[in-house]
Image: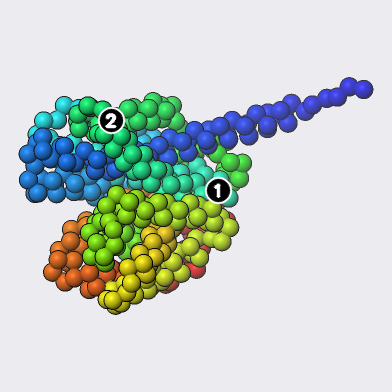
Amino acid sequence: MSSTKNPADHRDVTTAASKRRFLIRMVTVLIGGMVLDGYVLGIIGPVSGTMAADLQLTAVWQGMIAAAALVGILIGSPIGGWASDKFGRKPIFMFDIGLFAIASGMQFFIDSPVWLVVVRLLMGIAIGTEYAVGWPLMAEFSPTHLRGRLMAAMGIAWYGGFMIAFLTGHLLVEYTDLSWNFILGTSTFLALAIFLARLGMPESPRWLWSVGRKDEARALAAKYMPDDALDDLQHEDVRKGSFGMLFSKEYWRATVFISGFWFCAVTPYFAIATFADSVLEQYGLAGGLAGGVGLSAVALAGVVVTFLLIEKIGRRALTVPPQWLCAVVLAVIGLWAGAPAIIVLILFLVFSFFNAGYNTLTNVYPGEVLPTEIRGIGTGFAAAVSRVGAGIGTFLLPLSMENLGAGPTMLIAAGVAFVGAGLSQWLAPETKGKSLTEAAAGYSH
């Protein structure tokens, strides 16, 4: 008895396998960008002492070097988002990692604080551009049932990159004679590897469709995207996006939500995480490496839990209740002046866990609630607003701790968290299980 196989069945299996391989590759190179982002921000800490002594840095220069990357992100994210909507995801996707590799390589030769600020600024611009193109690309290529998890995985990658850099930097400083220039420049090797891995990656079919290149979009969608994506793709509009669309009657709620939510999520986090040592000491707790790493480890656990639950219980359940909880926790810390140290520590750990969890949703929502033609500029604008919050929190927290004290400072942070919780209660949608076209068209909760 002979058996026969339908050739079409073989083609279907091959196509499905090739699509899985492509998705793995796309996810890898996008997650690599987030690892690189975390690495760049984490590697400077271990070498800061040697670097400051070698370059004879004043406090002002140290602050400028630390702030340069944040300023770069503030510049790069809206410009990169605008460019990715206008010229396509692919060219900007390659440009930002190329710029990063060049700027990172320049760190091997730096011998002045001025050049260090310039280089860190350029690297920040590249990171901001990566935010504005990487998250939209992940959303546009992901299967609907995995989209939330894949985008949440980018948050895990950021923490992973930061912790890898922190550990690598300390080991190289402690056990080798490598210069601080070389240690900072180690990010170049990772950047070059990601650049090479991105060569040959296709343009986003959704972007091609949005600018009217429908035949190219259909061909690439059939080759690379999930089977149900082509039908969803053909429901999208063909229209030119603009910055003004973010504030149109149709999309102003989405813009206000993703920008305000992101701002209120990161402002207290960056302030407390950046100055974890001094904040903990104000409450009679042991700071140092163990305190900072402990808060970071708990935050990473919060991101992992969100990753595991996002496609099971949905976005809104992981966004709204945790914000109210964190606001209450910060308020309790601020009002309970005589709280035992162990209680304060537990409260800080609770805040770190849940805040990191809903911070993960700041990676997810922008790619889902905006249409393709403004997905890049919308993500970039929200990222820029969030960096303003990060800068405000980082700059004002030490001043507030010194002039107002720990209690009032925590109450201010609680106020920001309450605003974010109220905004999310009002506007946070549920996009679980929806295609991108449905999520953007039906912005409601």
Question: x, y percentage for residue 262?
Answer: 34, 59
In terms of depth relative to the viewer, which is nearer, 395 or 50? Answer: 50
Q: Nearer the viewer, residue 343 or 261?
A: 343
Q: Identify the residue at image location x=35%, y=30%.
A: 190
The answer to whether one can see residue 421 in this image is no
Label 2 to label 1, Cα distance in Å? 42 Å
Front position in the image: 400 or 151: 400
Q: According to the image, label 2 marks what residue?
A: 175
The colour scheme used here is: rainbow
Callout in the foreground (2, 1)? 2
Amino acid residing under circle 2: Tyr
- Is residue 315 visible in the rendered image? The answer is yes
Please give left or right for residue 300 compared with residue 340 in the image: right
Tell me which amino acid carries mark 1. Answer: Leu
Spot occupied by residue 151 in the image (x, y as percentages of width and height): 46, 48
Vertical comparison of 120 with 196: above or below = below
Q: Residue at x 46, y 50 (%)?
A: 152
Q: Quadrant of residue 200?
A: top left
Q: Could you tell me which secondary element the residue under label 1 belongs to?
A: loop
Q: Find numbered disc 2 in the image and state the secondary structure of the residue it sits on.
A: helix
| Tag of residue 146 | 1
The image shows residue 435, relative to residue 260, as above or below, that is: above
Quadrant of image for the N terminus:
top right
Q: Which mark is residue 61?
A: none
Which residue extends farthest top? 2
